[in-house]
Amino acid sequence: MKFILFLAALVVIFLLAFIVSNNKKGIKLKPVAIMLVLQLVFAYLLLNTEIGLVIIRGVSGLFEHLLKYAAEGVNFVFGGMAMKGAAPFFLNVLMPIVFISVLIGIAQYIKVLPIIVRFLGLVLSKVNGLGRLESYNAVASAVFGQSEVFISVKKQLPFLPEHRLYTLCTSAMSTVSASILGAYMTMIDPKYVITALVLNLFGGFIIANIINPYEVTEQEDIIDIQDSEKQTFFEMLGEYILDGFKVAIIVGAMLIGFVALISMINYVFAAIFGISFQTALGYVFAPLAFVVGIPSSEIVDAGTIMATKLLSNEFVAMIDLGKISESLSSRTVGIISVFLVSFANFSSIGIISGAVKGLNEKKGNVVAKFGLKLLFGATLVSLLTAAITGIML
């Protein structure tokens, strides 16, 4: 049954992408097929083999140690509050982002990270049917995040046509930044965080190839990555510490606003219709939850979490998932978990268009214009990742 559902999910996802495609005759089936196979292979390795178990244990163990080191700094500043068993979300989940940001800064400063990102981008460009810039941007988005990544390609922004800009933005919205991986791993099983990170990378290329197919000439496909101004080591440390803190504060502020807003809407909606707004959305998303492999008895609960992520953000949805996870099957928890690991939500439209506008106002306006189509594509990426995970569980 799950194989039939998987095929149905592929048909639904690809059909939805095809309907909004801006060049239906230009869709290249070969790279789509290759990357779909790669997704299946990586999903199987990560979720069903000893090799995958070793990889996941290694990565999650690394982040576990990093979070412990981060806790030392948090405990020093906040007087051990985080050690009393009832530390607030801000201390346990968001503050470690500061330390992870510092490590990314160090890797960037010693030129290790740029080499890795460029190498992976070059390898991906051989199979994804897109340009080297798009491939670089996808890997860089998974490291730096959906807004910061555009700084590294700001020299190219004025010259990028709309179709290439769309692909860059799709990658940025479909992935998550390395600095918050540790935060996710405190909320959902690390194996689903890692699996989603890998699958979304290929999924972004698959959906972009259907919605937004195009050819890139050699003359157009030039990577001229913007290097940051030369800083001393301690200037760099200060910058990345503050950047990490800003991310934590921004996420915290968004959580306060969204959780409070959803709570108010639920109350008003329930008073009028006798059902919460989130539950109503759960029924709307239930068919999508079913088609990606979630058992029929749990599709409304799953649809509610999926809708919450789309309307607010992944952190709010992960908190809600944690509240009901014990009442759901492990299969459902796994599928929902991978769906949540991306930046595909309405607020990201403003974040990405704002980031691009800060570097080039004209291109920022272009991004805002295709914002809904961008969110649509990134959500299809999450659904594809969920469907592939469903066939493996």
Image: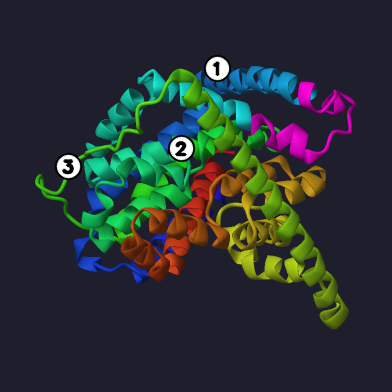
Q: Position of residue 322 (x, y in %)?
A: 77, 44
Q: Earlier in the sequence, mark 3 or mark 1?
A: 1
Q: Which residue is found at the position 76% from the left and 58% from the top?
A: 259
Distance of label 2 from label 3 (alpha carbons)? 21 Å
Residue 186 shows up from this direction: yes
Q: Earlier in the sequence, mark 2 or mark 1?
A: 1
Q: Which residue is found at the position 63% from the left and 50% from the top?
A: 314
Does the magenta run of residues contain 85? yes
Seen in the picture, residue 357 relative to 66 is either above or below; the reply is: below
Q: Which residue is mark 3?
A: 222
Seen in the picture, residue 280 relative to 37 is either above or below; the reply is: below
Q: Which residues are magenta?
A: 76-97
Query: What is the three-letter code of the residue carrying label 3?
Result: Ile
For the residue pair 74 and 56, the one nearer the viewer reads as 74
Horizontal arrangement in the rendering, residue 378 relative to residue 187 (left or right): left
Q: Position of residue 179 (x, y in %)?
A: 55, 33
For the residue pair 306 and 43, the one nearer the viewer reads as 306
**Contact (CB < 8 A) between labels 2 and 3?**
no
Distance of label 3 from label 1 (alpha carbons)? 38 Å
Q: Position of residue 117 (x, y in %)?
A: 35, 30
Q: Which residue is mark 2?
A: 144
For the residue pair 364 and 113, the one nearer the viewer reads as 364
Query: What is the three-letter code of the residue carrying label 2?
Result: Phe
Q: Which residue is mark 1?
A: 54
Q: Secondary structure at mark 3?
A: loop
Query: What is the three-letter code of the residue carrying label 1?
Result: Val
**Contact (CB < 8 A) between labels 2 and 1?**
no
Q: Which residue is found at the position 47% from the left and 21% from the top?
A: 106
Q: Residues within 10 Å of mark 2 (few under 14, many from 20)?
A: many
Q: Earlier in the sequence, mark 2 or mark 3?
A: 2
Distance of label 2 from label 1 (alpha carbons)? 26 Å
Does the magenta run of residues contain 219? no
